[in-house]
Structure formats: C-alpha cells, structure tokens
Amino acid sequence: MITLDHVSKVYSSRGQEVRAVDDVSLEVAAGELQVLIGPSGSGKTTTMRMINCLETPTHGSII
C-alpha cells in the first residue's frame, strides 16, 4: 500500500514560492491501479518522483 498524507512540494524560483503539488492525499492498495491525469504543470511527475523517493515532500508524508 502507498499512502500520501497531505503531501505538498514547494520550489523557490526567482525569490518566489512555486507550489508544484498542493495538499495531495491518496491511498493505493496493493495490486490496485490508479492513474494521475491533469494538464501540463499540474504536478503529476513531481508526485510520482516523490512516491519513488527521487524528490522529498516539503510538507506531509508518504508511506
């Protein structure tokens, strides 16, 4: 099982805060298939990178 609990990712760009992912909560059970769908720049890849431990969430937890 994968659990995202209030996960956010914030980057700093030119002195401004950019929220790539904002307060995502999600549970994926073992053997379950889920799909992330959204427009370009909506945080899909960043979310997957955090699930795969390639990025660290700014807030929240992934178990």
Image (tube, helix red, strand yellow):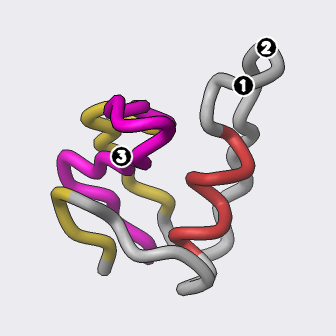
- Residue type at mark 1 is Gly
Q: Is residue 2 above or below residue 16?
A: below
In three-dimensional space, the C-alpha distance between marks 2 and 1, rounded to whole angstroms, equals: 6 Å
User: Where in the figure is residue 27, as x and y percent of width and height?
Assistant: 38, 54
Left or right: where 50 falls relative to 23: right
User: Where in the figure is residue 33, as x and y percent of width and height?
Assistant: 73, 54
User: Where in the figure is residue 3, as x and y percent of width and height?
Assistant: 33, 65
Residue at screen point 40% across, 75% down: 56
- CB under 8 Å between discs 2 and 3: no
Residue 47 lies within the magenta run: no
Q: First in sequence, mark 2 or 3: give its number.
A: 3
Left or right: where 16 falls relative to 35: left
**Residue under pointer 3:** 10
**On residue 39, which mark appears?**
2
> Residue 14 versus residue 58: which sits nearer the camera?
14
**How busy is the neighbourhood of tag 3: few (under 14 within 10 Å), some, or many (20 plus)?**
some
Left or right: where 26 falls relative to 31: left
Q: Nearer the viewer, mark 2 or mark 1?
A: 1
Residue at screen point 29% across, 42% down: 25
Q: Give the position of the C terminus as an image quadrant.
A: bottom left
Name the element at disc 2: loop
- In which quarter of the view is residue 57 placed? bottom left
Name the element at disc 3: strand
Residue at screen point 25% across, 35% down: 23
Which stretch did the figure color magenta? 1-20
